[in-house]
Image (spheres, rainbow, N blue to C red):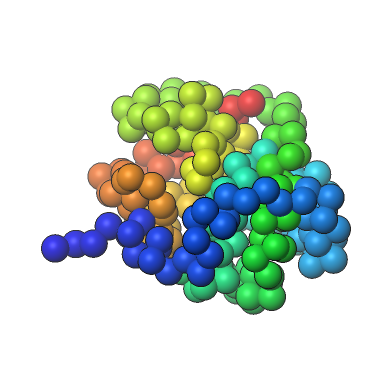
Amino acid sequence: MRIPTWIIAALCLAVPVAAMAADGDAKAGKAKAEEAGCIGCHGTDGIATANGLAIDKHVPNLAGEPDLYIQFQLVFFRKGVRKNDLMSPMAAQLSDDDIRNLAAFYASLPPNKTPVAPDTAPDETKYGEKAVQGLHCNNCHGEHLEGMENMGRLAGQREDYLYKALSDFKSGARVGTGPEGMSDVVYSLGDPEMKALAHYLSRLR
């Protein structure tokens, strides 16, 4: 029997969910983000741009992500459940309090409101919108895809990051949490659908 990836991930957590849900200190989180160099990639306001290391389009925006979602991802990086050449060693140095404080800081920031550029692929946008409706993404990620609890914010996220995330969930390179793992959600999606989803979601504000 195939064990859902979210169960595997949950078993790997070093911090109990109840402890992760404890309130962090956003001010201390900001100081830690500056000290650890988080702002070099994710921006001083949590919006990753082409400045600095965020020229890598796979670096996500963190502003407005749900507190618990950020905590989960940092613990995943710390435990090796989720792997990244840069984030894994950085997360390994974080204490439980650091993780709670960083999550509180980024969750307190206003989400991406940068005006979107003219749509160069309107057909892809429509395709992506239909895919979102068909997959019922709002059931887990919120009515406006703003993220809920341990489910990430999709609206306004960087397009290349979203596409890579979907591809990694499909390949099994990344695991998700929740009643239904993301690998199961994207299992039937082809590359054109994942690209359309990423394009549509990145344009939401």
Residue 36 rendering spot, x and y as whole percentages: 79, 67
x, y percent for residue 155: 57, 33
User: Please, is residue 86 above or below residue 41 in the view?
Assistant: below
Looking at the image, residue 180 sits to the left or right of residue 109; the answer is: left
Instruction: Tell me where residue 38 appears, x and y as whole percent.
Output: 76, 60
Q: Quadrant of the N terminus?
A: bottom left
Q: Quadrant of residue 98?
A: bottom right
Q: Which residue is painted at 63% across and 75% down in the image?
A: 92
Q: Is any part of residue 202 visible from this angle?
A: no
> Which residue shows up at 64% across the image and 70% down it?
91
Q: How many marks?
A: 0
Left or right, 200 with reference to 42: left
- In percent of the image, x 40 and y 61: which residue is there? 10
Q: Is residue 145 above or below residue 100?
A: above
Q: Quadrant of residue 84?
A: bottom right
Name the spot of residue 173 as percent of width and height, x first.
40, 64
Tell me what residue is drawn at x 52 percent, y 53 percent: 18
- Quadrant in the picture for the C terminus: top right
Observer able to see residue 195: yes
66 versus 173 height, above or below: above
